[in-house]
Structure formats: C-alpha cells, structure tokens
Amino acid sequence: MSELRIIISGGGTGGHIFPAVSIANAVRELRPDAQILFVGAEGRMEMQRVPDAGYDIVGLPVAGFDRKRLWRNIPVLFKLLRSQWKARSIVRHFRPQVAVGVGGYASGPTLKTAGMMGIPTLLQEQNSYAGVTNKLLAKKARKICVAYEGMEKFFPANKLILTGNPVRQNLLNSALSREEAAQTFDLLPDKKTILVIGGSLGARTLNNTLKDGLDILQEHPDIQFIWQTGKYYYKEMAETLEDFAPLHNLRLMEFIKDMAAAYCAADLVVSRAGAGSISEFCLLHKPVILVPSPNVAEDHQTKNALALVNKKAALYVKDNEATDKLIPLAIATVTNAPQLKELSNNIAQLAHPDAARAIAQEVIRLAEEKNNKKA
C-alpha cells in the first residue's frame, strides 16, 4: 500500500473547522497510516482547535478582504502574496497526494498553489450559495463535495458530489435520554424547551431579542429556555438578568460545552443559518427557526435558510423582524405538537449521516490515482 499524505486547508470559524476535523478523522478510520497536515490562518481559532483534535497545523499570514473599505486591502494583498510563497514551501516539503479545501482564508492560497504544482484538489462547499474563493478554485479542482442540490449553477456538474456537510461526531454518539439532558441544565423534562444559540461568539440580534423579551418569557413559565449568549454578550445579558425578576424557566450560558445534551433537551432550536449548524439540525431531526445573519458574504445564510423553508423543513424570521416576531413565533411553534412533528420529519429527509466518510473516500481515491500515475 502506497503512502497517503493529505493537506486540509481552511478555517476561521467553527463552521469550517468542525467539518475539516471530521474529514480528517474519517480518513484516519479508513487509512490509519495517513499523514495529515492542516494549513490555517495565523491568529485564527483553527490554530488552537486543530492541535486540540490531535493534528499538526501550519499557519499562513493571510487575512480577509474588506469589501466596504477597499483602501484597507493594500496590506491584505501583501499578506496574500506572502501566504502563496509560504504555501508553496509547505506543499513542496510535505509532498501531499491531494489537497482539500473546506473554506476560510487559508484555503485560497493553499489550494491555488497545490493546483499549480500538479496536486489534485478537492473542495468542500458547505453553503447553498457558493463562496467567491471556492468558485475561483473550482476551475482546477478535481472534485467538489456539496451539501445542497442545484449547485451546478456555480460549479461544473461533472465535478459535483452530493455528500452533505460533516458534523461533530460526538453529537451523533450521545446516549443521553431527554430526562438526563434536561437535568444537565437543571430543567424539568416534562416542560417544552427552546434552545437559542448564536454561535461561540454570539449573535447580537438573537441576544437583544431575548433581552427585550424577558417579560414575555416571564409570562410563559411552562416553557423553558436555554440561551447561549456567546462570549461577546454574556456580561451584558447577565447584568440585565440581575436587574430582572428571577426567571426560573431560563438558563443563561456564555458557551454550551455539551451541545449533544442541549440538542437532546430542546424541542425547538432558534439559530443563525450557518451551513454546519443546519447540517446538525438535519441529522438530529430538530425543529428549528432560522434567523439568518445579514453580515455574511453574498447573504448566503438567507439562501441556506430558504433551501430548508422551501421544503417545509424549517421556519424563518428575517434579522430585522426578529425583535417583533421571533419570540411569539417560537412560543407558538413549541406548543404546536403537529407542527413540531412535521418540521422534524421534513428536516430529517435532508440529512446526510455519512458525509465525512463519503468525502474521505473521495480524498483517498484521488490520492491513489495520483500514486498510480507515478508508478
């Protein structure tokens, strides 16, 4: 059996890092001898999260473009040039048979350089609306693994493989009962529970909506709330709660470490519409109200949300309407058992439980093709 050396590049957010690590883990399951090197962006969260997962990572001095203040991009261009030189050195010394791009700042220079050096490349596009970097890299890519149907409007149809998005494995392996999950948050298992999550950093709209709606939560003691604020907003939200009458039906948390327990306890989730989160909701059959972030490239979160809404697999509230509509809709939905069942059944149809393995198999196949050409 010939050697297997793989570069996986990308990151910037958990939504890119979790799938990347899941792909690496799946490769290792199929080929324990595989040597895997991650390439990330200096100063971004992958530089810590990837080593925590047991993999080596090298950082590039790359940064994102400022689309609103173009004059600030001159240093960014120099960083991009330096990143391409460094990526060339990394590829030359590591000698991969295949390079995988999962999105994020580092994937651009890494995959472009690998392609120019004759290394087969594979892209993993998580969103229903393709990002600029992946559209540029698609010309040289051998295969493009996608999570949504209809992606031939962005990429060559003959390169597409519908795999779905890999998710954190620990979410699928949880053996918690609903009762145990509720007790984890000191909640009652017989009450309807709404989980509100805005990512590890937090979502301003979701936090302000709950902050302004505490009186409504107080009027519904029969409904419980688990509220993850994210680190940027926790202090402000905690201080607001201190000035409010005690809310025994609310659990305020900066960050939820045990997401498997949170999902298990929840009858309904309120969330942004990131591709990774949506894939988790599909796999766990979770009814969800999506509030897409307006602060993302090409408004791709709205397109992610509508892909589910059009199949009656999720509900959707616009960011600028959340203050008025979100909490009343969440309360009405969580108390409507037939609607919860319909949402759960429909979102389950969109799940791809073997996404990481499917992508790993394609990565290994490309590497073996490369080795066979050498032989």
Image (cartoon, rainbow, N blue to C red):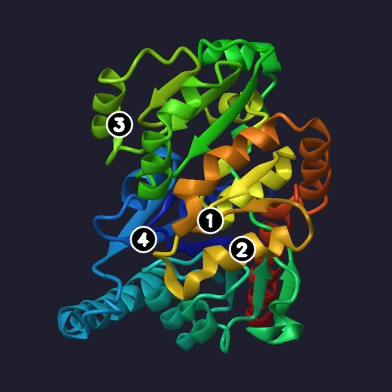
Q: Which residue is mark 4?
A: 40
- Is there a contact, CB below 8 Å, between mark 1 and mark 2? yes
Viewer-proximal residue, 115 or 130?
Answer: 130
Mark linked to residue 304: 2
Quick one: label 4 or label 3, which is nearer the N terminus? 4
Q: Residue at x 49, y 62 (%)?
A: 8
Q: Amino acid at mark 3?
A: Met
Q: Residue 183: x percent and y percent?
A: 57, 10
Quick one: label 1 or label 3, which is nearer the N terminus? 3
Q: Give the structural element (helix, strand or loop) at label 2.
A: helix
Name the image quarter holding the N terminus.
bottom right
Viewer-proximal residue, 229 or 375?
Answer: 229
Quick one: label 2 or label 4, which is nearer the N terminus? 4
Mark linked to residue 274: 1
Select label 2 or label 4 by which is in front: 2
Q: Residues within 10 Å of mark 3 (few under 14, many from 20)?
A: some
Would you say 159 lies left or right of 201 here? right
